[in-house]
Image (spheres, rainbow, N blue to C red):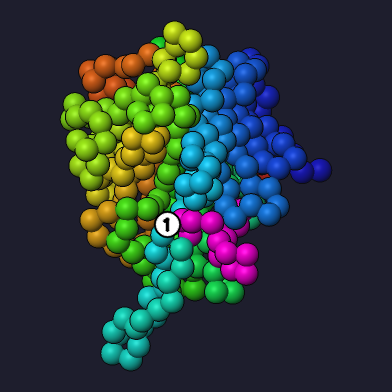
Amino acid sequence: MRNLQNSVQADFPRAQVLPTPSGLKFLLDGHELAGYHFGHGLPKPFIYPLKGHSGADLTRLGHPNPQSNHDHHRSIWFGHQFVRPIEMEKGQKPATAVEWNFWEEPKPISDIKIRHSKVLALEDGSEFAAAAVEANWWAGGRSLIKQTTVYAIAPMADGGHALDIQTELACLDGRMIELGKTNFGLLGVRVAKSMSEQFGGGRLLNSEGRTGEPEIFAKPARWVDYSGPTGPGRVEGICYMDHASNPRHPVSWHVRRDGWMEAAFTMADAWRIAADHPLTLRYRLLAHSGKSTLESLNQAWLEFNKTKPYQISQPKGQIPIVMR
């Protein structure tokens, strides 16, 4: 008989990830803090919500103005505005290729979709709970990109928690894929209405001490923080961190007063993913209480930068695990 069980933990795990009918949920000390959704009919997988220490939702679905045509803003999600395969002609010159928009909502007759394909591993523990998942960026009748992502919820020493997001984008069939020059890609975060500068009492701050959209937009930084009220007399926030191992670190940022932030990986220039050269990116979304100071968030980024990447391992005769 095959042994499909990993070693039983001595203590009940603080952090857990559990399947749901349409995705996964992440718990810390029995409280649900985030959900990963990939159910049938969705144009792309996404995280909703990310909760704060108080239990309040720190993210939202869509723009506060329902007429703004921002239905594609699904809390925390991956996408890109300009994705094109680079076909090579004779003489190894790149040929003109069709371009697909994986950022906005696809039209009803379109086959553009980021399709969740499988859960690779689930891991509970005292230091983190993680899910490794696979998705395919599909358009034009074929899969263009295979995306492997680890989502991990981890308790922090100060009582807060973090959602770590580590993703790998790999091209298929040996064809080079270009992520075109645009502000829209790759990981978007839409914060709660009350936390935004425009619709609530929020504040944008980056690692260089700049505040507000005009001072932060298109500027390089190690992190950007969005903090604001989540209840009477209560302030919470999300610090979105770019790991130093990422290409183009420190990244330039796309931020808006209406409650939006994104590490704009291709703001300055396009990026090409070649065969056997996948693009790997590591981010942390730190959920914290209070309007944290520049010093405390810079220290939190240093702690994130010391962490090792997540790895998927399958011990012989046992189920796959996520480890560091």
Could you classify mark 1 by the number of other residues whose Cα lies within 10 Å: few (under 14), some (14-19), or many (20 or more)?
many
Q: Which x, y percent locates residue 242?
A: 32, 38
Residue tagged 1:
80
- Quadrant of the image occupied by residue 131: top right
Residue at image point 41% right, 24% down: 200
Residue at image point 33% right, 35% down: 257
The answer to whether residue 56 is seen in the rendering is yes
Residue at image point 62% right, 42% down: 37
Farthest residue toward the top? Answer: 233
The answer to whether residue 155 is seen in the rendering is no
Q: Which x, y percent locates residue 302?
A: 27, 26
Quarter that holds the C terminus: top left
Is residue 139 covered in magenta?
Answer: no
134 w.r.t. 28: above or below: below
Farthest residue toward the right? Answer: 1
- Quadrant of the image occupied by residue 86: bottom left
| The one of 28 and 82 positioned closer to us in this rendering | 82
Per the rendered image, the range of residues in magenta is 102-116
Q: Is residue 272 left or right of residue 131?
A: left
Q: Which x, y percent locates residue 43?
A: 59, 55
171 w.r.t. 264: above or below: below
Q: Is residue 71 left or right of residue 263?
A: right
- The amino acid sitting under disc 1 is His
Residue at image point 39% right, 64% down: 82
